[in-house]
Image (tube, rainbow, N blue to C red):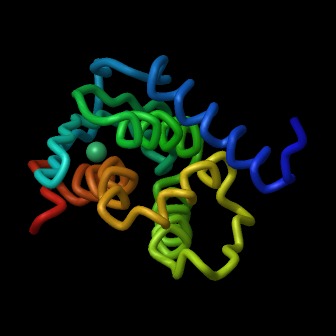
Amino acid sequence: MVMQADDQLRQLYQEVILDHSRSPRNFGKLEPHTHAAEGYNPLCGDQLELYLRIADDGRIEDVHFDGKGCAISRASASLMTEEIKGKTVGDARMLFERFHQAITSDPSASVDGRGLGKLVVLLGVREFPTRIKCATLAWHTLLQALDGGGTTSTEE
Ligand code: ZN
């Protein structure tokens, strides 16, 4: 079977998402932690808790998530923890800006995936607007944790 490069890439991305949703990285509560928040996406029923341990110099020493949700929300949370671990809070916020801009961009336009690391595998979600909130839930929960904790909902 001959596949176009695009299809091959799509399939590879699909496999990465499946892998992360089946065996999420950094899954389970983190103790001790310095920051935590809960996120809820009522559209899909995704629910997650995020735990961070942030050093005095602003570096994210460790980050874990827990909860239950669809494959996209789990994969996105798992990929996020991998990407932000070791980064400073400022760099993590910047990465979210970039990711958010890319994932909410026009699906028919080409997207600049530079600087997004493994997060590029999630950009196929652009074609399914109802799933974008599944992919950004972990990030909104991250901001909630950084900005004082509590609970955030994608419907607020
Ligand atoms: Zn979902």
Q: Quadrant of the N terminus?
A: top right
Residue 118 location in percent, x, y? 66, 46
Q: Is residue 106 left or right of residue 15?
A: left
Tell which of 65 and 90 is nearer to you.
65
Q: Is 8 above or below relative to 148?
A: above
Q: Residue 152 at x, y = what percent?
A: 14, 55
Q: Position of residue 110 (x, y in %)?
A: 69, 77
Question: Which quadrant would residue 130 be assigned to in this image?
Answer: bottom left
Q: Residue at x 15, y 47 (%)?
A: 40
Give the percent coordinates (x, y) of residue 91. Answer: 56, 60
Along the viewing direction, whichever of 9 and 60 lies nearer the viewer: 9
Instruction: Residue at 69% x, 51% y: name it.
Output: 117
Would you say 117 lies left or right of 139 here?
A: right
- Is residue 128 shown left or right of residue 156? right
Q: Nearer the viewer, residue 7 or 144?
A: 7
Picture quadrant of ligand 1: top left
The quadrant of the image that shows the C terminus is: bottom left
